[in-house]
Amino acid sequence: MTKIRISTDRQSFTAALDESDTAAAILASLPIEGRANVWGDEIYFRTPVSLKAAADARADVEVGDLAYWPPGNAFCIFFGATPASHADEPRAASPVNLFGRIDAAPEELRAIPDGCPIRIEAA
């Protein structure tokens, strides 16, 4: 598995990418810089990547999942319930392409404020 680093001005995390086409597109676009948008217990930000929904895209995700949201060309980090959730499980606004997992506790990710600069690079 390929590793990436996700950094803010306060924290740094590693994540493992799977072997999907989405992961390959994200990796080819590194480094990616943006500003965190916080939506419940999800952080997302726009990327230069432009992909369609994968055949296995889905809205139900797990804590720690990294995903790409096609309607917003966005990199997403899920770590708890979102406004679209039915309970405590994370749920995307619409189907996303899963492509990896972050090595961070939900409480660490909750400390990232809306608007915070964020950078993704090869580890």
Image (tube, rainbow, N blue to C red):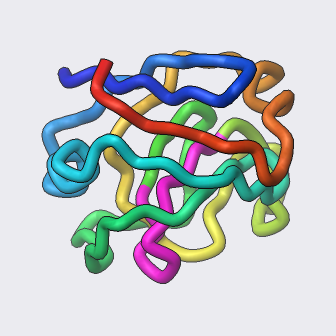
Q: Nearer the viewer, residue 76 or 116?
A: 116
Q: Is residue 68 left or right of residue 13?
A: left
Residue 82 drawn above or below residue 84: above
> Where's residue 26, x and y in %?
27, 50
62 and 23: which one is in front? 23
Along the viewing direction, whichever of 30 and 19 lies nearer the viewer: 30
> Is residue 95 toward the left or the right of residue 123 in the image?
right
Question: Which residue is drawn at the image coordinates 34% and 26% (left, top)?
Answer: 4
- Tell me the quadrant of the picture where the C terminus can be found: top left
Could you tell whether 29 is left or right of 34 in the image?
A: left
Q: Is residue 76 magenta?
A: yes
Up-down: is 119 above or below 55? above
Left or right: where 9 falls relative to 72: right
Q: Would residue 120 be counted in the magenta stretch?
A: no
| Residue at figure coordinates x 77%, y 20% from the top left | 108
Name the residue at 19% across, 55% down.
Answer: 25
Residue 70 lies, in percent from the top left, at 41, 75
Q: Quadrant of the N terminus?
A: top left
Give the image location of residue 16, x and y in percent: 33, 24
- What kind of secondary structure does the magenta stretch mostly adopt? strand
Q: Residue at x 83, y 51 (%)?
A: 114
> How many numbered marks does the figure carry?
0
Residue 120 in the image, given as x and y percentages of width and height: 43, 37
User: Within the image, what quadrant is residue 53 found in?
Assistant: bottom left
Q: Is residue 62 above or below residue 15?
A: below
- Give, as a single range, the part of the protein colored magenta: 68-78
